[in-house]
Amino acid sequence: MNSMLHVDGLHAGYGKALVLNGVDIEVEEGAIVCLIGPNGAGKSTVFRCIYNLLSPSRGSITFKGEEITGLSQRELLDRGLGYMLQRDAVFPEMTVRENLELGGYTAPDGVDTDDRLAEVYDLFPKLSTRESQQAGTLSGGERQMVEFARGLMQDPDMLLLDEPSAGLSPKNIDTVFEKVLEINELGVTILMIEQNVNTALDYADRGYVLENGQTRFDGPAETLLDQPEIRDAYLGG
Ligand SMILES: Nc1ncnc2c1ncn2[C@@H]1O[C@H](COP(=O)(O)OP(=O)(O)OP(=O)(O)O)[C@@H](O)[C@H]1O
């Protein structure tokens, strides 16, 4: 397997506060990798560095074998790296279709928006039946689907997902992870931050545990929860 994304010795912070002090993550092409860790461990900060929303003070980030530190979001999308943010980011006044078409505008050259829309509707049939509905009137789970679908409009090779299941009901959480799996099976490599550790690790190939801005453990997802320190920290023993 080829390495898709490689984060090596990442250090970063906000002002004088150092938040990351040695993060190493390897994501192989085709994998689903899950980044877990307590609140404030620095998970979103890792994503901000990868997506050039924050400049690292040390370390390197390579995507498809090339250094990407400092590249604009436009360049990252052109290279096939997409990002779905944690916060609710649909445009509520716009219809479902308009939200998706917006995703298409930022797609790399050569991606046809109409073709892409048809493929995305295949993946999310419910959204095609709601395409004229204002996104702000959708349920939380449906809005999450719109965000997901919008990220896919860019036809990425890899997606960064920041807590795709955040704030959803148990039923919708399963639906989101099923979609993650389906999208992965279509060839999209996934790196996701998750608080629903048990469920996320059920779907992931590999997991990384971040604590105090450092990678503390990593391993195949199915064996990660066998480690007593991780069980104690996440499942109360
Ligand atoms: N813009 C900012 N300015 C100053 N400090 C920040 C900023 N953003 C995050 N931090 C701090 O950096 C640390 C790591 O935050 P980060 O959001 O990366 O953690 P996280 O692991 O994603 O947490 P959570 O699981 O709660 O979302 C925290 O202590 C946070 O308060």
Image: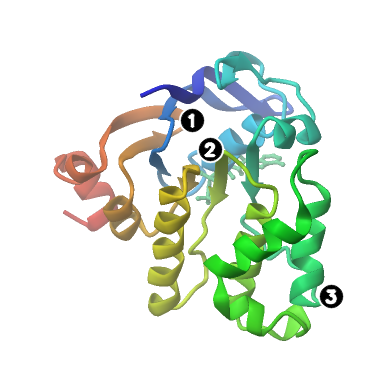
Please, what is the three-letter code of the amino acid marked with disc 3? Answer: Met
Quadrant of ligand 1 in image? top right
Q: Is mark 2 within 8 Å of ligand 1?
A: yes
**Does the rendering let one see residue 25?**
yes
Please, what is the three-letter code of the amino acid marked with disc 2? Answer: Gly
- Determine contact: label 2, label 3, CB under 8 Å: no
| Mark 2 or 3, nearer chain start | 2
Q: Is mark 1 within 8 Å of ligand 1?
A: yes
Residue holding disc 1: 213
The quadrant holding residue 149 is bottom right
Is 206 on the left or on the right of 90, as rendered? left
Neighbor class of circle 1 (other Cα within 10 Å; few <14, some 14-19, many 20+) is many
- Determine contact: label 2, label 1, CB under 8 Å: yes
Q: Nearer the viewer, residue 53 or 115?
A: 115
Viewer-nearest of labels 1 and 3? 3
State the residue at coordinates (77%, 40%): 110
State the residue at coordinates (22%, 41%): 224
Q: Secondary structure at mark 3?
A: loop
| Mark 2 or 1, nearer chain start | 2
Please, what is the three-letter code of the amino acid marked with disc 1? Answer: Gly
Q: Nearer the viewer, residue 130 or 197?
A: 130
Neighbor class of circle 2 (other Cα within 10 Å; few <14, some 14-19, many 20+) is many
Residue holding disc 3: 94
Q: Which mark is residue 123?
A: none
Which x, y percent locates residue 189? Answer: 47, 40
Q: Nearer the viewer, residue 198 or 135?
A: 135
Q: Secondary structure at mark 2?
A: loop
Residue holding disc 2: 42
